[in-house]
Amino acid sequence: MTKPEIKTVETGSCSMRYFQFGTGPKPMVILPGLSVQSVMNAADAVANAYRSMAQDFTVTVFDRRTELPAAYSVSEMARDTAAAMSALGLGGAYLFGASQGGMIALLIALDHPELVRKLALGSTAARVAADRSGALSRWVGLAAQKDAVGLYLDFGEKLYPPGLFQMLRPALIETAQTVTEAELARFVTLAGGTAGFDVTDRLNEIACPVLVLGAADDAVLGETAFRELVDGRTKEPLFEAYLYEGFGHAAFDTAPDYKKRLTQFFLQSNK
């Protein structure tokens, strides 16, 4: 697979980096979750992870906007990402959002339905309640203290099952050594953007088919977040949900059949 080229789209209100891969006729958009370093640094790894979808889809992966304001809410992230999708002509996209990216995807589907043909949500939530923000609060505190190693280790421990976390621990420590103060400050702003997020009363406004994928051992948002998304959707059109047992928050990276489930959902005909 050709190495993805990092590009920038200008919307008039902001600039946003993105990369694309695949040659398929259907437009797919991936909105990744919160990360300490930009997903743009891992473009090759992302393209390789989703290579099975490259024949059916042309995939666009977005970063958050380049220049962040002092405070940047999820709703503002959704506004800017929708503008970037529109600027690139990505209407009627097959949209997949993971974790915070899923929150952004929810708002795009609600406020810009013309941009979303189908919506897939992974390890995300319709709201971030104060009593559920413990992991996020710890991460913000560690980043504010400029403790990149502590942040990476806590991040990894919450995202991955214990065995995998121990295996990845040396690599996480090594990667943490490359984190800059600017990246830590950016992380604080992005993580803070989830505060007060709540679309639970709007879930039935979503007009496109929806797939919700959760993890029973999610130590970031909890299984309750998955249940709220599922229970909050009582209205057609097509709605599917699946809970992974034995997987943590990062099931979207670790469950072996995850991409297969996405592909089947995106390609199946609506009935």
Image: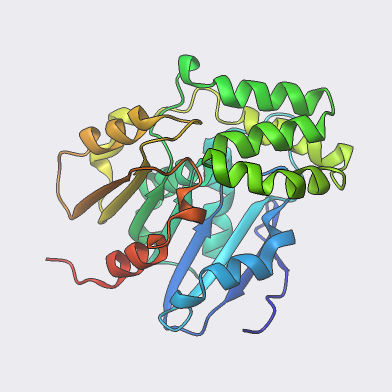
- Name the residue at the left extreme: 271
Residue 151 locus on image (x, y percent):
73, 32
Q: Relative to 192, is 100 above or below?
A: below
Q: Quadrant of residue 204?
A: top left
What is the x, y in percent for residue 213?
34, 48
Counting from the top left corner in percent of width and height, residue 84 is at 59, 59
Pick whichever, 139 or 118, lies toward us. Answer: 139
Q: Residue at x 72, y 52 (%)?
A: 38
Q: Residue at x 86, y 40 (%)?
A: 182
| Residue for point 67% across, 56% down | 39
Of residues 31 and 74, the one nearer the viewer is 31
In-image side of 39 versus 134 (left or right)? right
Examine the rendered structure and indicate whether residue 198 appears above or below residue 248: above
From the viewer's perspective, tell me whether residue 89 is left or right of residue 116: right
Toward the top, the furthest residue is 131
Horizontal side of 31 relative to 192 (left or right) equals left
Image quadrant for the N terminus?
bottom right
Q: Name the foreground residue: 158 vs 119.
A: 158
Number of numbered discs visible in the structure rendering: 0
- The quadrant of the rendering that contains the C terminus is bottom left
**Snapshot quadrant of residue 110:** top left
Residue 34 visible in rendering: no
Q: Is residue 110 left or right of residue 248?
A: left
Is any part of residue 100 visible from this angle? Answer: yes
> Residue 116 sits in which quadrant?
bottom left
